Image: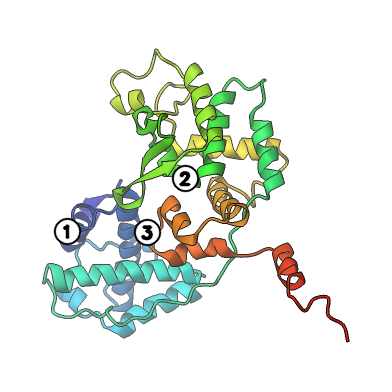
Amino acid sequence: MINVEQNPEFLNSFLDYSMTILNKSQNSVKEYNYDLNMFLKYMKLHFNMTKETDFSKISIKDLTLKDIERIEPEDILSFLSYLALNKNCKPATRARKISTIRIFFAYLSQKAKLIEKNPAQNIETPKKEKRVPKYLSLDDSKKLLNVTNDENDENKERDYAIITIFLNCGIRLSELVGMNTKDIDFNEYKLTVIGKGNKERTIYLNKACVDAIKNYLEVRPKEGIKADNKKSQEALFLSKRRERISNRTVQYIVEKELQKAGLDTNKYSTHKLRHTAATLMYQYGNVDIRALQELLGHESISTTEIYTHVNNEQVRNAVESNPLSNFSS
């Protein structure tokens, strides 16, 4: 929950705008609030408006729009330097924060017209490091599915369905937790999910997913579901307490199954299963990058392109397929 009482009015106004007009998710709005709280606390230090150096004790409630109008591009760059040098923030983290600051100042100057200038308008985004996403190999993915389908586990059907959907559909954790029974169309083999920014999209299910879900529905509790909680009654996946399963519970399930499969839980996680699904589809299914973008719910094709990485065997095959590979003089 965001403690709006600790924010100045103009910040709360921006958060309301982000949720109602920009249609940002609650998680995104919480990130905006966190980023801007850090930024504004730094500005109070930067402008010698407080002697308190402990960020957790700095109050921004008393900041006014006149204080905000003092901020120049070099002050924002000073904040980015502080993040890099004092907080060891990676380029991706700094890029996210500058994106938040840009949206914030665009709202204040252009939408709400509360200030005259936008000091963040021409601030460049820090270049991100290009990283190959971690993912399970095909053999490791099969091993994970096999151990999850352990007959000795009382939640076998539920956990197997969860792992199967992650590995086959590339679904996000929040999307899986938010799944309802009515969202599944077994005739059309498809699923409707609500992704980032409350955007609805369709995910098509393969036979493995449909079979796993049907097997789970046969044992899914029919009674004892929290009657006062409609969200739990509609939920596909239920916890032992017979309410909608939580993010943390799903993360625990994935971690437990990874350990059973002998896989490194420091290297792999719930989100890495999404990477795995996308990578396997691209490497083995000849999936078009645009189709993969649609499936994963990415706004930008550049986000999807991280899955077009190639492994050493593919590089070797590319060299061997050169028509000159057998030529000798």
| In-front residue for pair 169/144 | 169
Q: Secondary structure at mark 3?
A: helix
Front-lying residue, 294 or 225: 294
Give the amino acid at mark 1.
Answer: Ser
Position of residue 61 in the picture relative to residue 79 (left or right): left
The amino acid type of the residue labelled 3 equals: Ser
Compared with 189, 96 (above or below) is below
Give the class, few, some or many, for how many residues have Cα within 10 Å of label 3's Cα (few <14, many ≥20): few
Q: Position of residue 324 (x, y in %)?
A: 77, 79
| Marked residue nearer the N-terminal end (3 or 2) | 3
| Distance of label 2 from label 1 (alpha carbons) | 32 Å
Q: Which residue is mark 2?
A: 171
Please report whichever mark, 1 or 3, sits nearer to the chain's N-terminal start: 1
88 lies above or below 16? below
Q: Amino acid at mark 2?
A: Ile
Quarter of the image for the C terminus: give it. Answer: bottom right
Could you tell me residue 306's position as x and y percent?
A: 53, 64
Gap in angstroms between the C-alphas marked 1 and 3? 22 Å
Q: How is the image coloured?
A: rainbow
Query: Residue 235 or 109: which is nearer the viewer?
Result: 235
Q: Locate residue 184 relative to residue 116 in the image: left or right.
A: right
What's the residue at 73%, 70% (across, down)?
321
Q: Which mark is residue 13?
A: 1
**Dot 2, how many residues are within 10 Å of its Cα: few (below 14), some (14-19), or many (20+)?**
many
Residue identifier under label 3: 56
Residue at the bottom extreme, as displayed:
329
